Image (cartoon, grey):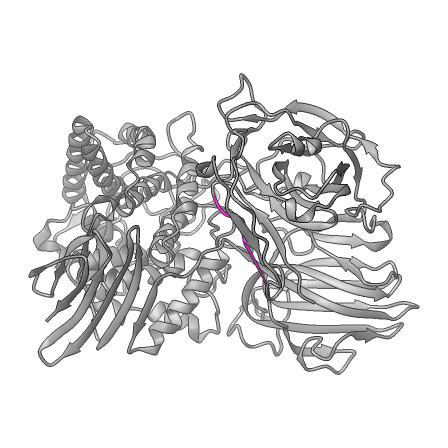
């Protein structure tokens, strides 16, 4: 069976028009629904008529799945029926029994998102019903979820739509069928898995013919207040600025092993599976790659049976290691698990509340007196609707495998936020997000999630003048160096998008961050002094956790002061801040930042540079040496230009140094490029080749042993293949002009397409006996230059440009 769902999401920039968005549920769309453009009322500029509604009898802050519904009548099928919807914490909206949306997009209490949806295709003349399931995870609330108490709000856009406004006419009840399943959840920051009891489920509650006469009346609270329209707020509403997620059916899983029943091949390929009474059956199912997916299980019969679905990125050997991810023999699952308790009914569809991240699913079925028939195990991929607009090809197949694996990594690490990892945390960390944003710009050309991330993180400003390390979040965590990367990320956006108004809005945030760091410079050394919070840099084994203060990944001097790495990262961000301030006519600040950068660089070189080794020590005490200090010395211009290449060669040629892990190799490659050695890049991909050899279908958080098998900061080659190997970069802010400086290294042929605000940049290069030749095609209105190996520059004009 195929199903399709249609909805329209109206963003804030579409105040006077709406565009139809199609959600794909299943393997394909069987029809299309077109809705003409129409005006949308300005509900984001004024107080709503609708009010937040909550359960009346149950606790509104503890765990609970709460159902809401309202029946209403229409004289005819409407051509438009636009509604604005939000909830605390998460909702799924139904119209006449059909699921039409999940939300809201994650935000904070002062940045609470609502969706604007066109639901006319689901309505009919006569009686209709709108319904919502709202989950509050209570003490198990995910780390990225802000919350006050359980609540729902629906505001109709026009006069006819206001019949569904949330008010005292709505009814509610608690769905007692759900409770959290907490097996193997201890270190996980995402929503808990579920135990679903079929005998307690109000089957058909979303449908019009359901008898809700026994439901309670809702408690009516405060009206909805968009940000800027009120005198006080519980949740300051703002329009969703990103599209709804992509939903797409996954193909059948493969049975890798089974117990209690002889099965092989694709799961349920031959139709229904009957589990006899008094049986215990266990099957290990393999998707073949890591995915994010909503899971639905359809069964008949099986009263008093128990189904357990355990989800994992990889299986574990007896010694706790994962080994090759393709291997399953002798390995066990450790993952979170959903538990389903059927009630014996026919064609019962059990739907866990949140999506799972997995490659492997272990399905265990225990039956009692009655056989159970398993009809379907549906998995619907969910992710931000990125579309791969870029292309990269070369004569080395390895690079193609890295490209494809990096792309899957990026897809799984973005839904309504950029995720650090989808299995464990789903938190939008700035350090991860800067890299993810650049990949988004280069591979997809879609900047909407990047803009949201910049705004989200800026809204996390603390009273002391530093950003939180991740946001949205229910727990405050501060990693000061991540605020510096936020400055770099704003600079990245400024260089790649002609959107100066957006950048100007956040310059005061840049000033506060720079001022916070300036206050922490020790005048006696010129380096950063004692530093509060968690001053994480990278994950080498030499920087372990300490019981005294949060110190995992913190280099020497990162707590007590005198860290060259942190001081130079501050200088690196000062350079980016100065460029933006100079452009926006803040020359006083720009000069102040440049002077501070120069002073820090000189202080580090005076106090930490070891002339014998030709390297910067990690701290003023010179207790250790790492690649990281010299990387930041190069990026911040602290190391004089004539010494940079030699210093870089030393750090990549000395295995005794503390090594940059997969995350910090992004910055190592920035330094590689800056010192003129970028032709070595394609020969330095052993980290990623090793992960492929381990059977990973996405790139891991760190070298083995790695907790997370999918971590977006590890997908940086998808950026570097385009920006470094093919050499496509902005030559001026806003990508108004282009610089193309390819670095083929050992490759003989490369070609790529890079999305640009004006169109596409296409490049083809081939090594010949006479040197590198190729063609560069620029979009209309875009000029630039090509730079060869010897720094000669050739002007580029719109259209095709031959490189001889």
Left or right: where does residue 487 sit relative to residue 262?
left
Residue at the farthest top position: 231
Image check: 752 left or right of 182? left
Query: Does residue 686 appear in this view?
Result: yes
Q: Is residue 520 above or below residue 717?
A: above
Q: Percent position (x, y) of residue 94?
A: 70, 46
Regarding residue 189, the answer to whether it shows in the image is no
Q: Residue at x 53, y 16 (%)?
A: 231
How far from the left and from the top, in percent, is residue 61? Answer: 70, 33
The quarter of the picture where the N terminus appears is bottom right
- Magenta stretch: give its range: 242-248
User: Is 364 above or below relative to 343?
Assistant: below
Q: Residue at x 28, y 78 (%)?
A: 395
**Residue 719, percent across and down?**
32, 59
From this view, report whether residue 643 is shown above or below residue 241. Answer: below
Q: Is residue 190 left or right of residue 595?
A: right
Nearer to us in this view, 736 or 135: 736
- Of residue 480 and residue 383, the one placed in the foreground of this image is 383
């Amino acid at each position: 069976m195929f199903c399709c769902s249609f909805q329209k999401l109206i963003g804030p920039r579409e105040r006077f028009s709406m565009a139809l968005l199609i959600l794909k549920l299943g393997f394909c769309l069987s029809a299309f629904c077109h809705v003409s453009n129409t005006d949308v009322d300005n509900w984001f500029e004024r107080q709503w008529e609708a009010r937040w509604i909550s359960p009346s009898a149950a606790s509104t802050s503890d765990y609970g799945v709460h159902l809401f519904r309202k029946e209403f009548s229409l004289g005819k099928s409407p051509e438009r029926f636009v509604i604005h919807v939000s909830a605390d914490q998460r909702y799924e909206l139904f119209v006449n029994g059909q699921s039409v949306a999940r939300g809201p997009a994650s935000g904070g209490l002062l940045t609470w998102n609502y969706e604007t949806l066109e639901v006319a295709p689901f309505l009919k003349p006569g009686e209709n019903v709108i319904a919502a399931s709202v989950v509050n995870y209570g003490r198990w609330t995910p780390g990225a979820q802000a919350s006050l108490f359980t609540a729902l709000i629906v505001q109709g856009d026009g006069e006819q739509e206001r019949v569904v406004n949330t008010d005292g006419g709505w009814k509610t009840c608690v769905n007692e069928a759900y409770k959290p399943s907490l097996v193997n959840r201890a270190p996980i920051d995402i929503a808990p898995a579920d135990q679903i009891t079929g005998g307690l489920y109000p089957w058909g509650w979303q449908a019009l013919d359901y008898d809700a006469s026994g439901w309670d009346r809702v408690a009516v609270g405060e009206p909805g207040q968009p940000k800027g329209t009120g005198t006080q707020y519980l949740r300051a509403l703002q329009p969703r600025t990103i599209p709804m997620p992509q939903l797409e059916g996954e193909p059948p899983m493969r049975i890798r092993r089974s117990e209690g029943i002889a099965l092989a091949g694709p799961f349920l390929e031959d139709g229904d599976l009957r589990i006899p009474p008094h049986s215990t059956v266990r099957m290990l199912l393999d998707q073949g790659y890591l995915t994010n997916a909503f899971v639905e299980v359809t069964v008949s019969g099986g009263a008093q049976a128990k189904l357990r679905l355990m989800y994992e990125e990889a299986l574990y050997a007896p010694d706790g290691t994962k080994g090759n991810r393709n291997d399953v023999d002798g390995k066990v699952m450790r993952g979170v698990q959903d538990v389903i308790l059927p009630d014996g009914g026919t064609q019962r569809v059990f739907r866990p509340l949140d999506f799972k991240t997995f490659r492997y699913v272990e399905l265990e079925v225990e039956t009692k007196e009655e056989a159970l028939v398993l009809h379907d195990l549906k998995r619907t991929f969910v992710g931000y609707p990125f579309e791969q607009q870029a292309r990269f090809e070369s004569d080395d197949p390895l690079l193609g495998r890295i490209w494809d694996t990096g792309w899957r990594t990026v897809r799984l690490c973005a839904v309504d936020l950029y995720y650090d990892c989808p299995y464990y945390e789903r938190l939008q960390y700035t350090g991860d997000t800067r890299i993810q944003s650049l990949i988004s710009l280069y591979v997809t050309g879609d900047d909407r999630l990047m803009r949201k991330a910049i705004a989200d993180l800026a809204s996390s400003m603390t009273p002391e003048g530093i950003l939180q390390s991740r946001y949205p979040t229910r727990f405050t965590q501060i990693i000061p160096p991540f605020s510096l990367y936020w400055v770099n990320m704003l600079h990245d956006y400024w260089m790649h998008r002609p959107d100066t108004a957006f950048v100007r809005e956040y310059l005061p945030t840049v000033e506060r961050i720079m001022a916070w760091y300036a206050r922490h410079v020790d005048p006696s050394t010129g380096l950063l002094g004692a530093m509060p919070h968690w001053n994480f840099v990278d994950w080498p084994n030499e920087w372990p956790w300490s019981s005294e203060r949060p110190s995992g990944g913190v280099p020497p001097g990162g707590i007590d002061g005198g860290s060259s790495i942190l001081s130079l990262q501050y200088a690196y961000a000062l350079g980016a801040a100065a460029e933006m301030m100079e452009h926006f006519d803040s020359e006083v600040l720009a000069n102040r930042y440049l002077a501070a950068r120069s002073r820090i660089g000189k202080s580090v070189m005076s106090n930490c540079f070891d002339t014998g080794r030709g390297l910067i020590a990690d701290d003023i005490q010179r207790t250790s040496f790492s690649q990281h200090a010299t990387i930041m010395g190069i990026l911040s211009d602290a190391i004089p230009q004539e010494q940079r290449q030699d210093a870089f060669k030393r750090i990549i040629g000395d295995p005794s140094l503390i090594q940059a892990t997969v995350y910090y190799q992004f910055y190592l490659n920035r330094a590689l490029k800056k010192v003129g050695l970028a032709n070595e890049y394609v020969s330095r991909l052993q980290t990623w080749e090793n992960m492929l050899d381990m059977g990973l279908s996405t790139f891991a958080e760190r070298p083995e042993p790695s907790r997370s098998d999918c971590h977006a900061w590890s997908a940086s080659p998808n950026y570097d293949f385009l920006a470094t190997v093919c050499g496509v970069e902005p030559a001026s802010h806003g990508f108004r002009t282009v610089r193309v400086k390819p670095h083929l290294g050992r490759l003989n042929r490369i070609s790529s397409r890079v999305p640009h605000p004006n169109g596409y940049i296409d490049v083809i290069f081939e090594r010949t006996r006479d040197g590198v030749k190729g063609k560069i095609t620029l979009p209309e209105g875009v000029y630039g230059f090509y730079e060869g190996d010897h720094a000669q520059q050739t002007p580029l004009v719109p259209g095709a440009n031959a490189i001889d």
